[in-house]
Amino acid sequence: MFVTSIISAITDCRTDPGELTREQAHRAMQVHLYCSVEVCKVRRRARQILVEARLMVLDERAEP
């Protein structure tokens, strides 16, 4: 059931999934590969987690 709730939490671009593990954030970035962080709340949250974990480095032109 836990896995199902995580999968459903990262499928809807309109819903912030809340806290994600690094692995979940990485998967969310793959699932939402073609989404924009300006529109997709899942991709925005996943990017935030990966940047904070220093697993992703943003280009200096990117929005925080």
Image (cartoon, rainbow, N blue to C red):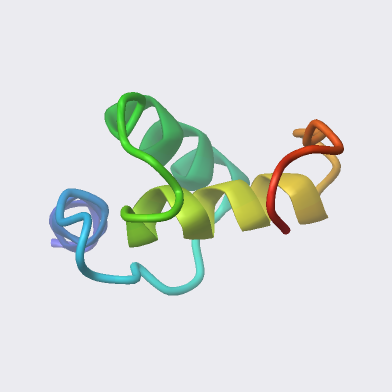
Q: Is residue 42 left or right of residue 14?
A: right
- In which quadrant of the rendered image does the C terminus lie? bottom right
Task: Residue 52: give x, y in percent of width and height.
Answer: 80, 56
Q: Residue at x 45, y 45 (%)?
A: 24
Closer to us: 6 or 35:
35
- When the figure is inspected, residue 63 is found, relative to residue 9, above or below; the finding is above
- Furthest toward the front, the residue is 61
Q: Residue at x 50, y 45 (%)?
A: 25
- When the figure is inspected, residue 14 is found, relative to residue 24, above or below; the finding is below
Q: How many marks?
A: 0
Task: Residue 48: give x, y in percent of width and height.
Answer: 64, 56
Q: Is residue 6 left or right of residue 5?
A: right
Closer to us: 29 or 2:
29
- In which quadrant of the rendered image does the N terminus lie? bottom left
- When the figure is inspected, residue 61 is found, relative to residue 21, above or below; the finding is above
Q: Is residue 40 left or right of residue 11?
A: right
Q: Residue at x 51, y 34 (%)?
A: 26
Task: Residue 35: give x, y in percent of width and height.
Answer: 31, 36
Residue 59, located in which quarter of the rendered image?
A: top right
Task: Residue 14: give x, y in percent of width and height.
Answer: 20, 65
Closer to us: 46 or 44:
44
